[in-house]
């Protein structure tokens, strides 16, 4: 055997051992440590057995079968095996995906929620339909039709706008024509002449307004000074008046207390005055009837009636 043959045989042997090792490791990883699940879609999108199963973008298993569902032939049953520790839960959603742009279809499963209940082996993973190429093409056709109608409508509106713009330009040309320019020039000349004639009056009026403004400023300053001069005496008088009012209020309160304390004495005094008045009335009546009582100490005896 030549040296080349020996080298070739050695290379083939090493390649065979490497391939066997890789196949063994893959089978060991995806064989006894996988858990079966299934999901249902109405559009498989070219998904085939052996396609990758992605959980949050990470490869966790393989698709083992793609077939119409026995209970509902309108759905496609997809069987898959994933790693035993993959945390599939009730919030996880299976849908069509791609590993890369150049690769084939894959089954993508979202991570769901950490609080959601974990799915048991053999359970159905909730699914979400992806838009098919036919649906996308149909929507694109609808968009294209709407775009054509919009372009046609916009073209008509642009024609109308273009006509309005031509009309506006024609009106501007008419306004800015030679006759109107002459009228505007004559109007400006009249305005300039009026300003030249009335300018001295305007200047005199402006001077008077300035003088009046200065006089008003001086008057305001004088009033401010007068107010400042009078303010302090008025403030002092108000303070004194407030103090006097407080003293008067206190005096009235004291008098009220004194009157309440001597209330019974006042009643006695009034009663005495009433009694004295009655006595004085009786004395007056007695003097009216017997005026001599004021001169004589002893009253004369009554005259006897003659027999």
Image (tube, rainbow, N blue to C red):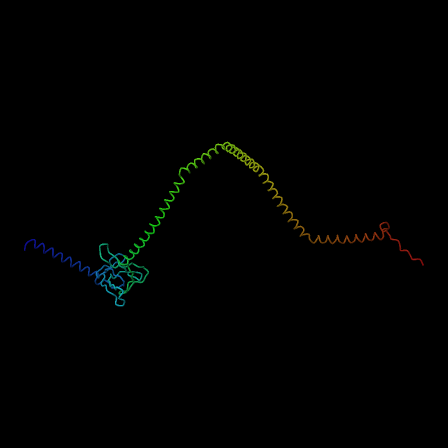
Query: What x and y, as percent, mark residue 44?
Result: 25, 61
For this orientation, the residue located farthest to the right is 307
- Name the residue furthest left: 1
Q: Nearer the viewer, residue 63 or 286?
A: 63
Residue 246 as seen in the image, left or right of residue 195: right
Question: Quadrant location of residue 42?
Answer: bottom left
Q: How many numbered circles are shown?
A: 0
- Residue 188 or residue 63, whichever sits in front: 188
Q: Is residue 256 above or below residue 50?
A: above
Image check: 176 left or right of 197? left
Q: Locate the C terminus and report the quarter of the image it occupies.
A: bottom right
Image coordinates of residue 273 in percent, x first then y, are 75, 52
Q: Nearer the viewer, residue 130 or 231?
A: 130
* Left or right for 65, reference 295: left
Placement of the N terminus among the 4 image quadrants? bottom left
58 or 131, which is in the foreground? 131
Residue 19 lies, with reference to residue 198, above or below; the image says: below
Q: Residue furthest bottom?
A: 71
Measured as percent of width and height from the top left, residue 205 is found at: 52, 34
Percent of width and height locating residue 188: 45, 35
């Amino acid at each position: 055997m030549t040296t080349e043959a020996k080298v070739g045989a050695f290379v083939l042997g090493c390649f065979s051992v490497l391939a066997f090792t890789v196949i063994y490791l893959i089978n060991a990883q995806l064989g006894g440590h996988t858990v079966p699940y299934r999901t249902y879609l109405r559009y498989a999108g070219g998904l085939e057995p052996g396609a990758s199963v992605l959980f949050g973008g990470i490869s966790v298993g393989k698709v083992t079968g793609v077939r119409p569902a026995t209970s509902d032939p309108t759905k496609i049953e997809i069987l898959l095996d994933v790693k035993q520790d993959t945390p599939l839960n009730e919030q996880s959603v299976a849908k069509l995906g791609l590993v890369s742009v150049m690769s084939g279809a894959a089954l993508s499963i979202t991570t769901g929620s950490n609080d959601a209940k974990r799915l048991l082996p053999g359970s159905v993973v909730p699914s979400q339909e992806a838009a098919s190429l036919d649906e996308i093409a149909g929507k694109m056709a609808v968009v294209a039709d709407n775009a054509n109608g919009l372009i046609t409508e916009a073209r008509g509106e642009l024609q109308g706008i273009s006509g309005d713009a031509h009309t506006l330009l024609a009106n501007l040309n008419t306004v800015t024509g030679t006759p109107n320019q002459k009228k505007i020039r004559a109007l400006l000349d009249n305005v300039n002449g009026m300003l030249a004639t009335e300018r001295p009056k305007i200047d005199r009026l402006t001077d008077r307004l300035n003088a009046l403004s200065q006089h008003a400023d001086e008057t305001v300053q004088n009033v401010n000074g007068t107010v400042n001069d009078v303010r302090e005496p008025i403030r002092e008088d108000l303070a004194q008046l407030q103090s006097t009012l407080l003293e008067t209020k206190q005096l009235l309160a004291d008098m009220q207390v004194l009157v309440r304390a001597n209330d019974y004495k006042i009643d006695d005094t009034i009663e005495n005055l009433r009694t004295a008045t009655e006595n004085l009335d009786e004395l007056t009546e007695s003097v009216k009837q017997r005026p001599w009582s004021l001169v004589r100490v002893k009253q004369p005896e009554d005259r006897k009636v003659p027999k």
